[in-house]
Image (tube, grey):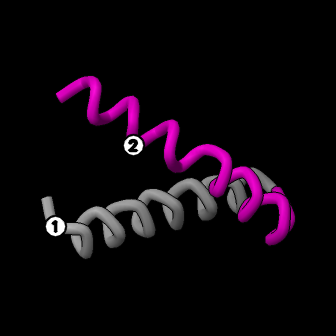
Amino acid sequence: MTEEHSTETRRYKFEQIRHKELARGASEDEATRIASETVDKVLAQEAKEQ
């Protein structure tokens, strides 16, 4: 996996999480904070599953 691809994947997951939090009713700042805290955990879990 190239570094550019992993950055794109991380950004994509970040945006998915952020949008889910916004849909849940979180503020922009809160959604960004939660996504930042969660994205690496989600990617690590997905890597373990493969």
SS for dot 2: helix
Residue placed under numbered mark 2 in the picture: 43
Q: Place residue 48 in its image quadrant.
A: top left
- Residue range in magenta is 26-50
Taking the image as shown, residue 41 lies to the left or right of residue 31, namely left
Q: Amino acid at mark 2?
A: Leu
Q: Amino acid at mark 1?
A: Thr
Query: Is residue 36 a member of the stretch shown in magenta?
Result: yes
| Image x and y of residue 15, in percent | 52, 66
The residue most toward the top is 49
| Image x and y of residue 25, in percent | 81, 56
Which label lies toward us, 2 or 1? 1
SS for dot 1: loop
Tell me the tag on residue 2: 1
Residue found 25% across the figure and 68% down from its top? 3
Counting the numbered discs, the total is 2
Disc 2: CA contacts within 10 A as few (<14), some (14-19) or many (>=20):
some
Along the line of sight, the residue nearer the viewer: 14 or 24: 14
